[in-house]
Amino acid sequence: MSTDADAFLSALRLSDSFLPVGSYTASYGLEQYINEDRIEDGEDLRALIAAYLRRLVGPCETVAVANAHAASADGDLEGLLAVDERLHAVTMPAEFRESSTKAGAKLCELLLAETDGDEHSSTLAEAIEDGSTPGHYPVVFGVVAQHRGLSRLEACLAHAYSFVTGLLGAAQRLGRFGHTEIQAALEDLQSVIESVCERHLEDDIAAMTSFAPLAEIMGMRHERAGRRLFMS
Amino acid sequence: MGYRDVAKVGLGGPVGSGKTALVKRLVPELVAEGYEVGVIANDIMTQEDADVFRESFADLLPADLVEGVETGACPHTGIREDPSMNLAAIDEFTERHPELDVVLVESGGDNLAATFNPELADYFLFIISVAEGEDIPRKRGPGVTQADLLVVNKTDLAPHVDADLEVIEADAGEVRGEDPFVFTNCKDGTGVDEVLAHVEREVLFA
Ligand SMILES: Nc1nc2c(ncn2[C@@H]2O[C@H](COP(=O)(O)OP(=O)(O)OP(=O)(O)O)[C@@H](O)[C@H]2O)c(=O)[nH]1
Ligand SMILES: [Mg+2]
């Protein structure tokens, strides 16, 4: 059993950009928004990331983290594979799927395959490694978080938080935003993270869906962008 | 007094493109025009650039207006994500010299994606060299496209490295749109006046 301190430290570790899973290469379409001059200032950026949270991270990825966490707690391998399959199906842009499965494979290698090793997680790790399930990041994240004693809500919060800081970091590298402006956006987004996670915590996997057409179009246009610093 | 009360000019660009050479050209001109100037160097490994400045500016600037700031092997972090230590150095400048007009901040040599945090630099120059290849502008690095002023240095070397200045000019014009760029030769000072004119107009008179 994890102690609370253990779980707390694991939450920090999982949401830290220090975690080597390549998240710094993903912009989830943000690079395309910036290339097309659709983000003028910190306020636009904050509003855009809030929309990502409400329409994409919340209804898709948070639902995946929460359900993966629950399936892992039940030792339900079929349940885990079903979450992974559903997330794959509802993630439209190819590059979003690619960023997510690449990071998922790395997190699996780093924390699931080697160290966690109960039966359903070793089987999941093998399935990811041999390509029989896509291995999306939120799914692996949910399992790893559950093993390390994070509650379902904590797992969702840690995941959403790292998504937000990942996107803010990408914005800072792509555009010209001051560090205090970025921190002010993060401060504002904290309450959005909370409400989105609470709202989707109990959603069934059948409810997993995104409604972020512009972000998805940006993600798809990014595939053919002339200038690309990011993988998605 | 603090970093918000002084004009700050950032100089970024790849390793060896001529950032230090340009600062060495600009400081005497600024001092001659009566500005009080501070200089910060973010060298990657050493205090070498700061030492070069201390020596070159020994008769021009008070020693406590030249500072080297280490960036923990992450030169772009120091000028972009977390400029705290550079801002702290500028705060010290302004405490000791409340009349300070402008601080030049030289980034450690970096890649074409390095840009300055707008809170660290009111105005940002990106310095590339023709000797790094005539294709640099058309790679559209954020440094090249987003800088307030693009400086293409070492024009004297163009014939020796098969770089065609007309190609660079056409590409720079295309990727920069309305934004300015200047050709310089820091060895003999050609073009430095033009850089200075931009800095004065956009930063010091602004
Ligand atoms: N021929 C020629 N040499 C130059 C010119 N500008 C700078 N140099 C030389 O190029 C070398 C590198 O110049 P620096 O000014 O130190 O370059 P830097 O960008 O400050 O380099 P780092 O701080 O190490 O990234 C030095 O030997 C300079 O004398 C120029 O316009 N023409
Ligand atoms: Mg230098």
Image (tube, coloured by chain):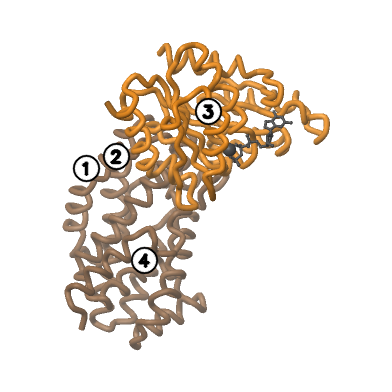
| Alpha carbons under labels 1 and 3: distance apart | 48 Å
Q: In screen coordinates, is A226 left or right of A69?
A: right
The residue shown at (60%, 22%) is: B181
- Do marks 1 and 3 both belong to one polypeptide chain? no
Mark 2 or 3, closer to the camera: 3
Q: Are marks 1 and 2 in contact (CB under 8 Å)?
A: yes
Mark 2 within 8 Å of ligand 1, using the beta carbon: no
In the figure, residue B52 lies in which quadrant? Answer: top right
**Whether label 3 touches label 4, CB < 8 Å:** no
Q: Which mark is residue A188?
A: 1
Q: Residue B28 bears which disc, if any?
A: none
Q: Amino acid at mark 3?
A: Ala
* Spatial CA span between label 3 and label 4: 67 Å
Q: Earlier in the sequence, mark 2 or mark 4?
A: 2
Secondary structure, mark 2, is helix
Q: Residue at the far bottom: name it.
A: A119
The residue at label 4 has a CB less than 8 Å from ligand 1: no
